[in-house]
Each structure stands twice: as structure tokens, then as C-alpha cells.
Image: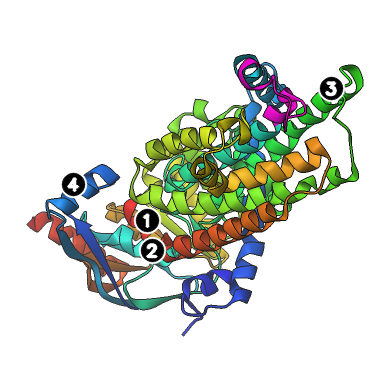
Amino acid sequence: MTTAANQKGKRLGLGRYFRNFKKYRYLLQEIVRKNVKLQYRNSVLGVFWTFLQPLMTTIVLALVFGNIFGRSNEGVVCYPLYLLCGRLLYEFYSQSTKRAMRSIRNSASVIKKVYVPKYIYPLSNVLSNFVTFAISLSVLVVMMAYYMLIKKVPDLHLTPYILLSFVPILILLVLSLGVGMIICTLNVFFKDMEYLYEVFCMLLFYMTPIFYTVKTLGTNKWIQYVLMANPLYSIVQMFRSCVLYGEMWNWHWFWYACGFSGVTLLLGFWIFYKKQDKFILHL
Amino acid sequence: MGKLAIKVDHVSVLFNLNKEKIDNVKEYVIKLLTRKLHFTEFWALQDISFEVEKGERVGILGFNGAGKSTLLKVIAGVLKPTKGSIYVSGVIAPLLELGAGFDMNYSGKENIYLYGATMGYSRKYINERYDEIVAFSELKDFIDVPVKNYSSGMKARLGFAIATAVDPEILILDEVLSVGDAKFRIKSENKIKTMFDKGVTVLFVSHNTAQVRRLCNRAILLDHGKVIAAGEVNEICDLYDEKIKAK
């Protein structure tokens, strides 16, 4: 009888949404499974790409920028690890939002014919990228072990704070989902969003202290404010505090990241909910 | 009176169409600045009302642009009506267009689960039906091959096999039976007929009145978004055939 309830649009209520989600959780599972499986199918190295890709890009970045910024060890501890932390998080954000953005358009043929809760598509694409991200975190584990045990970098040590590293990751997940919902709605109406967002992501890469530190940019207050307004900055810094420096994060970062991500998610759900009935007219 | 399966109550659908389709920011801004953003209103369906009882097989006839597909979309819950309401009781299985709902890089086997999940069925449920689906689609030797290597007939067979294996209570057939070779058409017609015995409700859209006469017991004739006739299948099909000749 769920179908009957779906179509009686007036009978609102959380119970209805919950029942609907329960029915379609299989679809969520199937799409996540599909995305993860297909990502590595037909590639010779398969799942190893999840490790190799961040490892190789980090090596490239370390070679290019290591000599420019890496020499002053202040606030960096170990430059390759500093890079990798930032890059892993940034990569998850940009990949998952890009996938989510295209998800509705890519499933147009289904959405036009069958009733499916449409948020399943952006949600499942963010989640499948989360799975790949979780796998790729093991690169960080290996790299950290290498620098601690073999290279014996003096300032690098594990503390219990590393257990808190899941907090910035969860905040990032919320942020990605929120942004994903907003831009996939926009992308239904304006398909050149894809190109605009591509450029935006590039800008974001340089705006986030991934290969530099805020200090190396000088003391111009305005530049620092602009950089700190970027929620990825707070999230990446929180993550580095736990993993790299082994200390508690700055609580300003925490509240800012939580607030920004929470508001983005609510905004995303709201825009999506308001516009989803019009999707079919534009697909 | 049998039990009600579908009730369409004074449904109207308004499309707010721009004369040219604008789907990017650049054009939108240019058109907005030059004040060329005209919208034309178009009623795809106007005040449609009818009821379908459980086990009835209703053919929906009409020329291109009469609103048949829009009506099916409203009933399937994909499109919200501008006015009026729809009541549907039971599980609807729409037969998707060729290949829609499949992922081309996924094998036939994996697509069975994906397609099933799209219709809201669990892996466990599909597992129970899996052998039946494979047997009906006659794709046993190709089940681990990616769907992109399937012929259109193979895709149609697989889609049909999944949609009919899950025991839907309402089956929406939108010109699907016109695909595939003659052998498959006969086989799928027979399959649908066996589903009639289980009391499935069918909505069937086609231009082929012979097929409608064979499969349906009632019919609705749509023209320009309005129901112009509804009733016993042969009467309506005769009317439609006359209209075709008159054109």
C-alpha cells in the first residue's frame, strides 16, 4: 500500500517518509554497490587504484611544492603527510559532489517512468564515494607508519586524539551531501552547471590549504579571513589536528564546520524537496 | 462492483512550456535580460476522471500528443497532477523503455537486482524469482555478460521478464509489446494472459487496435487531453479505427 500513500501527496508526515525510505533502502544499497563495483571493473589493478591514485598524486604534489613550502617545517610536521590529509578529504568532497550533481540527469530514464524517491540518487552517489574514500584512508595509515617507524620523523607521534578523526569526516559527509543536493537540483534546470562547478572545484582546491599553510601566505588579514571562511579549511584542519599533530582541534573550527555543513544540508533538502516535482519536466 | 484499483479523479496537468527549451545558465540570463522569456501554457490533460477495478484490463487509445503518456506518468506517480487526485491501490510495475533502468556496464545478473531494487524489491525477494526471470528471458548463456553487449531484443526480454516476475498488482504497458521478434511477442502476450488469471490490473497503451482487442476488456479514447469515449473495448476500438480512416 505504500504506492497509494506515495501518490496521495497530501497525506504528509514523517511516518510516510520513513516507510518510503525503508522500502527503497534496497535501491540505495544496490546503487552504492554498483558504483563501487563499476569503478574498478575492467581496470587491471582493480581496487588498488584507490590506494595508488592518492599516493601518486601526493608524490607529484610533494615533488612540485615540497621544495617551495616544505622547507620550513613550522606547522607542517611532515610535508607529504600534511599534503595527503588535505588531498584525501578534498578529493572525497569534490568527487562525491560531482557524482551527486550528475546523478539525477544520469537516471533520467528511470525517473521518467517509475516512482522512486529521487533523493536516493544524490545520496547513493555521495555514499559510494564515501566507501572509496574509506578504503583510500588506508594509504594514510601506511604512509604514517612509514614516516614514524622507518623515517622516524621526530614530531610525529600517535595520541588518543586520532580516535576523534571520524568527527571531521562525518562533518565533511554532511557538507558533501548538502552541496550535492543543491547542485544536482540546479543541474537539472541548467546543464552548464557541470562546467561551472568544475571551475569552482579547481578554485576550491587552491583556496583550501592543501599544499600550503595559511601562515606561508603572509599576514594579510583579508586573505586569511577569506581562506578561513571556506568550511573545508576548518574540516581539514580538524582532521590534521587529530591525525598529524595529535592534539585537540580548535573549537572555533568545529562550530564553524558543524554550523556551515548543517545549514547546507538543510538548505539542500529544502531546495530539493521544493523542486523535485519539476525535475521530470526538464529531464 | 469489484474492488477499486485505480481512481483518477478530475485530473488536469498543465505544462508551462518555454517556446525554446532553455537548459543552461547562459541562455537563461540572455533571455532574461532581453526579456524574451515567454512561457506558453499547455493543458496536457484536462479534467480526466475514470475508475479501474481490480482485474480489469484497460486499453488507452489516442493519436500522438493526445496525452496517453502523460496520463500513465500521472498514474505511475512520476508526475504530479496540477489539479485533481489519483488513488492507486497495490504495487505498480511499469515496463521501462528499452534499457532504461539498466546499467550498461553491469552484467545481466547484476542488472536483475538493480532493476528489482528500482521497483522497491529486496535482494532476497529477487533471489527467489531469479531462476524464473532467467528462464523466461532465455538469457542463461549471457547472464554474466555486460548489458551493453546485448541486442535490443535481449534487453527487452530481460526487462519484461523482471517486471512480470515480481507479481505486480498493476501492470503498465506502454507500447512495449511492439518490440522484439514475433516469437517473443507471442510469448509475452501469453505471459500477460496468465497474469490475467491471477487478477492483475493492466493499463495498456498502443496504436495497434488488434492487440488492444486481444488483451483488454475496456478502453478509453483520449484526444487533446480529454476523454472522448470510454467503454467496452470493441466499441472504442471501432471508433478509433473510424477516426484513423477519417483523417
Label 1, label 2: how far apart the Cα atoms are:
7 Å
Q: Which mark is residue A280?
A: 1
Residue bounds of the magenta highlight: A67-84
Q: Residue at x 76, y 25 (%)?
A: A78
Give the quadrant of residue B182: top left
Same subunit: marks 4 and 2:
yes
* Contact (Cβ within 8 Å) of mark 1 with mark 2: yes
Which residue is disc 4 drawn over? B30
In the structure shown, which secondary structural element does the residue marked by tag 4 occupy? helix
Q: Chain letter for mark 4, please.
A: B
Type of amino acid under label 1: Ile
Q: Residues within 10 Å of mark 1 (few under 14, many from 20)?
A: some
Relative to the observer, which residue lies in front, A154 or A240?
A: A154
B232 lies above or below A176: below
* Contact (Cβ within 8 Å) of mark 4 with mark 3: no
Q: Is residue A275 left or right of residue A261?
A: left
What colour-coding does the image apply?
rainbow
Mark 1 against mark 3, which lies toward the viewer? 3
Label 4, label 2: how far apart the Cα atoms are:
30 Å
In the structure shown, which secondary structural element does the residue marked by tag 3 occupy? helix
Mark 3 against mark 2, which lies toward the viewer? 3
Q: Is residue A147 left or right of residue B141?
A: right
Question: Is any part of residue B132 visible from this angle?
Answer: no
Type of amino acid under label 2: Leu
Relative to the observer, which residue lies in front, A33 or A208?
A: A208
Mark 4 against mark 3, which lies toward the viewer? 3
In the structure shown, which secondary structural element does the residue marked by tag 2 occupy? loop
Which residue is disc 3 drawn over? A147
Give the quadrant of residue A140: top right
Which residue is disc 2 drawn over? B79
Label 4, label 1: how far apart the Cα atoms are:
24 Å
Type of amino acid under label 4: Ile
